[in-house]
Image: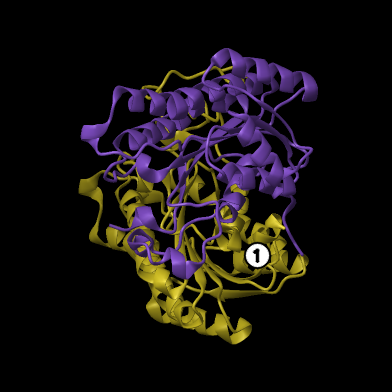
Chain colours: A purple, B yellow
Amino acid sequence: MPIIKEFQLNESIAVIAITSGKELYYLGEYLQIAGAVIFIIAQTNDILREAREIIGKETMGTVVDMTNRANIVEVKDRIVSEFSRIDILVTDSRWMVAKPIGSITENDWNEINVNNCRTTFFLCQVFAEAMKQQEYGRIVNIASELGDRAVADCSIFSASQATVLSLTKSFTIEYAKFGLRINCIATGWTLAEDIPLNEQQKELLVRYIPLRRKGTPADLAPLLIFLCSEACDYTTGQPIFIDGGLTARP
Amino acid sequence: MILDKFNLDRKVVLITGGGTGLGLEMVKFLSRAGADVIVAGRRLDPLESAVSIVESVGRKALAVQTDVSDSSQVQNLVEKSLGRFGKIDVLINNAAIVAENIVKPIWDISDDEWSAAVDVNLTGAFFCSREVSKHMADRGTGKIINTASGFGLRGGKDIYMYCCTKGGIIQLTKVLSFSLARFGITANTIVPGFIPTEATESEFRTTLPKSGDFLPAGELGQPKHIGPIAVYLASSASDYMTGEIFTLDGGGLSAGIAPTGYSPIENPKTGR
C-alpha cells in the first residue's frame, strides 16, 4: 500500500501534555502508531493512569502540576537529559466552563485563565526554547473554533481559545526562523467516546454540522500527524479548522 | 493503521493546471501516494511530461488539453476522464492565469484583462466544480480542492484580478462545502504564500519578496511543500474537514511580510 514516507514520525520524541479531557489519550496512541516515542505529562495521577491504559502501560510519563512554570522546566530538563532532544509538543487547551455571563465568578475566570491560557503559554515557552537550541521542533495546540465564533454560555471559554489561536501566531513570529513550526488545530464539536450516529443526531446542534456528526480522535489524528511530521515544513502560525464544515456555514 | 488513511490507491484525481509549478508537485506526490491522475491545462507539452512522471511510478495518467474558461472544453475534459477511468474521486482546481500585466494600476486595466483573469481563475474553477460535482453527488462521495493564495485573504498593491479571483476561490470553497456536504462531498482550499514557480517568475517578479527575510520561517516556500497537503486533502485522512483553509505560507499570514508587522529576527541560516 503506497504511503508517502514524509508522514512517518520515525521515532520522534513527542511530549503530550494532558490537563483535562480524554481525546489526547487517543491522539497520543495514534502518534505512537505513526512512529513517535510518547512521553506523557499529566496534570493528575488519574490522567496518567487513564492515558497509559490507552497508549500503553509502558508509556513513559510523569505527573506534573503544569500550573507552575518551574515544574514544566523540571520535566523538560528530565526529558532532554533522557532523550537529548524533543521533537514534538502537543497541548490541549479545552478546559471548559459553560455559564451565562451574569453567573461567571472571579474564580471561574482564574481557572479558565490558568488552565487554558497560562499553562499553554508556559508549556509552549519552555519547550520552544528547548527546541530552538536544536533548530527543529513541532508544536501543535489543540483548541476549539469557539475562539473564532461565539456561542451562548461560553464567553470565557471562547476568550481563552482566542488566546491560544493568537499565541500560535506570536510563537510563529518569534520561533519559526529557528526551525520550529507552531500550529493550532481548531476543532468543532468533538468527542472521545464512540456514540452511534443515530444517537448523535438526536441532538439539535449535530444537525447544524454540515457533515452531520461529531468529530472523533480518528478524524483529528491524520492532521495532527501531518503537523507533527517533517512534511509540515512550511505551514505555521495559522489555526487549521477541522470541524465537519461548521466554520464555513452561516 | 492510521497512516493508511493517507493512501490514495485506486483513487482517481483530476487536476487543472497540473503540468507546471505547484500543480506538477501535487501530481508527483499524489501519484506516489497511489493515485491515477488526469492532468488538464492549456499547453500540451508540460501535460505530457506530467503523464510520464505519473507512469514512471506505476500509476495511470491522462493528459487533456483544456482551457477551463470554456465550459464546452470542461465538459469534454470530464467526459474523457470518465471514459478512461469511470470515476473521479478528487477534483483539484489549480489552473490560474499567468500574465506579465497582472500588476497594474486600476485605471490601466482593460475590460478584457479583467475578464480574462476572472474567466480562468474563478469561472474555470466554477465550471469544473459544476461538471464534476454532479458525478460525485451521484456516487455520494468526492473531494474538491481549490488552490487560492495569501492574496485571496490580503490585498496586494495593484494586484486587482489575482486578489479578487483568489478571494472568490475561497468563497467558492465555502459555498461548495456547505451545499454539497449532504451529497458526501467535501471542499477545501490550499492557501500558498510566497512560493516562486515558473508562473510567478513572469507574474509577480516585481511584487514578490526577493527573500524570506521578513517571513517568520525566514525563507520563501518551495513548490514541493504543497505535495503532502494535497495528499492529506485528497485522501480519507481529511474526511472530517470541509470548507476550510489550509495555509502554506511560512507564517506570513500570522503577521505580515512588511517589517512593520513585527521585528525581524536574525536568521541563523543566513545571518541576516
Q: Position of residue B197 (x, y in %)?
A: 55, 48
Residue B182, x across and y down, in percent: 40, 72
Seen at 42% across and 36% down, the residue is B253
> Left or right of B148: which side holds B167?
left
Left of B262 or right of it: where is B44? right
Question: Which residue is nearer to you in this view: B53 or B249?
Answer: B249
Disc 1, SS = helix
Between B110 and B248, the one lying in front of the other is B248
Residue A71 image-quadrant placement: top right
Q: Is residue B71 above or below residue A186?
A: below
Q: Residue at x 23, y 46 (%)?
A: B106
Q: Which residue is mark 1?
A: B50
**Circle 1 crowding by C-alpha within 10 Å: few under 14, some 14–19, many from 20:** many
Q: Position of residue B2 (x, y in %)?
A: 68, 56
Q: Quadrant of the C terminus of chain A?
A: bottom left
Please state if A21 lies on the left or on the right of B52 as rendered: left
On screen, B9 above or below B137? above
